[in-house]
Image: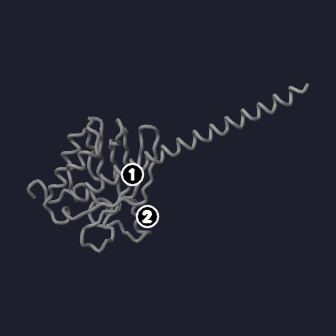
Amino acid sequence: MAAEPHGRDGGDENHESRGRDTERWRHAMEQAQREEAVKVVRVNSDFYAALTDKDIDVMARVWQKDDLVQCLHPGSPPVQGYESVMKVFRRMFAARDAKARKFCIAPEQVRVHVRGTSAWVSCIEEVLVAGGGGTPRHKLCATNIFRKAGKRWYMIHHHASPYPTTASAASGGGGGGGGAGGAVTLGDLLAGSNGR
């Protein structure tokens, strides 16, 4: 009879030990996920820095060299495959139009999610023109998807679409200049290229 309380106590100790082990494991996983999220945000920041600086070398390092990558700019059909995506960015960066040369894109309201070797970032892209007083000229909603290969994260998908005009009007943005619904289109960014 004396063994019964002892057995119960031992069971409680084992249960508490398993609970502590589970909590330590959960904490370690959350910490690892936070560290990966920081790496994803860095690559996401490199993408926007490359856009602003018109740096094709940085842009080339951001994207995974794969035929399955895809890029959807507002007002343009999807572009698939690494080489085709790079061709669009080379053309964009070579634009001779002054406004196209001076635009920069700043990601705001950045949210990152990491699940294993996949991650996605959602954000609002604020497209500004240098010397324009810092007021957003256009706003876009963007989703960027990343894949981890080896120890590095690479972009595999970028999709930007017009920011809702009602939300823009309510926030005082008004939607900005050209394109459908006042949003910037790829045509706006390519203005002045191809000999025009």
Q: Are marks 1 and 2 in contact (CB under 8 Å)?
A: no
- Identify the residue shown where x is 41% and y is 68%: 169
Residue 43 horizontal/vertical position (percent): 34, 49
Crowding at mark 1 (Cα within 10 Å: few <14, some 14-19, many 20+): some
Q: Which residue is mark 2?
A: 167
Q: Which residue is mark 1?
A: 41
In the image: residue 62, left or right of residue 40: left
**Tag shown at residue 28:** none
Query: Is disc 1 placed on a helix, strand or loop?
Result: helix
- Identify the residue shown where x is 19% and y is 54%: 92
Q: Quadrant of residue 146?
A: top left
Residue 59 horizontal/vertical position (percent): 24, 49
Q: Quadrant of the C terminus?
A: bottom left
- Using the image as rendered, state which of residue 92 and residue 153 is in the foreground: 153
Q: Quadrant of the N terminus?
A: top right
- Identify the residue shown where x is 33% and y is 68%: 136
The CA distance from mark 1 to mark 2 is 26 Å
In the image: residue 165, left or right of residue 27: left
Query: Is disc 2 placed on a helix, strand or loop?
Result: helix
Way the structure is coloured: one colour
Callout 1 amino acid: Val
In the image: residue 75, left or right of residue 174: left
Is the residue 83 above or below the residue 177 in the image? above
Is the residue 181 above or below the residue 89 in the image? below
Q: Of the residues tagged 1 and 2, which is closer to the observer?
A: 1
- Identify the residue shown where x is 18% and y is 62%: 101
- The residue furthest bottom is 133
Residue 162 horizontal/vertical position (percent): 35, 57
Callout 2 amino acid: Ala
Q: Earlier in the sequence, mark 1 or mark 2?
A: 1
